[in-house]
Image (cartoon, rainbow, N blue to C red):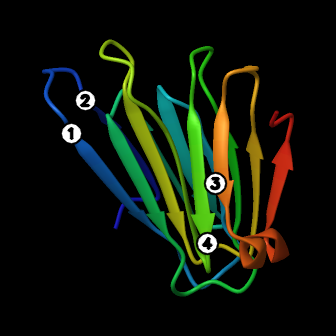
Amino acid sequence: AFPTGEAHSAAGGIDVAELYDSPGDDVFHASPHSARLQGATFDNLALSFHTVSVHSEAGDNDQGYLFDSALDDHLEAADDWAWLSSDDPELGFLIAVAGLEYVEASSSGQNDTHNVAPEALDWLVLLGWP
């Protein structure tokens, strides 16, 4: 494994980046154009992917920070997973997280929507959602 990795989706299509955690405490930051998973011994960056998915299977205290677009976005969450997406034909994206111990999901738009199951609020914090 490389301590630092950077991947670009530049040729079009619906490309997917799958990121996996380490045994340590990792942090995931994601927005429609970039996603970064960092740990004590690695730093992985995915740029311009339509879909980015992060899986926390090995860590103890993995955290995620999800940032929406300026368009109308939607957040779904239940059990131990969440996804943030937009169906916009130009900027469509999907950011998915599973198994993280703490996630903040930020909304910047009044037309953003969410469907969050009550059990997800044990690990998910909603910031700015209408």
Q: CB of mark 2 within 8 Å of CB of mark 4?
A: no
Relative to 115, does residue 13 appear above or below in the rendering? above
SS of the residue under disc 3: strand
Residue at x 54% of width, y 76% of height: 56
User: Which is more N-terminal, label 4 or label 3?
Assistant: 4
Q: Is residue 90 left or right of residue 15?
A: right
Res 40 label: none
Q: Label 3, label 2: how many angstroms apart (C-alpha)?
A: 29 Å
Foreground mark, 2 or 1? 1
Res 15 label: 1
Relative to 23, does residue 93 appear above or below in the rendering? above
Q: Is residue 110 visible?
A: yes
The foreground one among 98 and 11 is 98
User: Which is more N-terminal, label 1 or label 3?
Assistant: 1
Q: Which residue is mark 3?
A: 115
Res 9 label: 2
Q: Which residue is mark 4?
A: 78
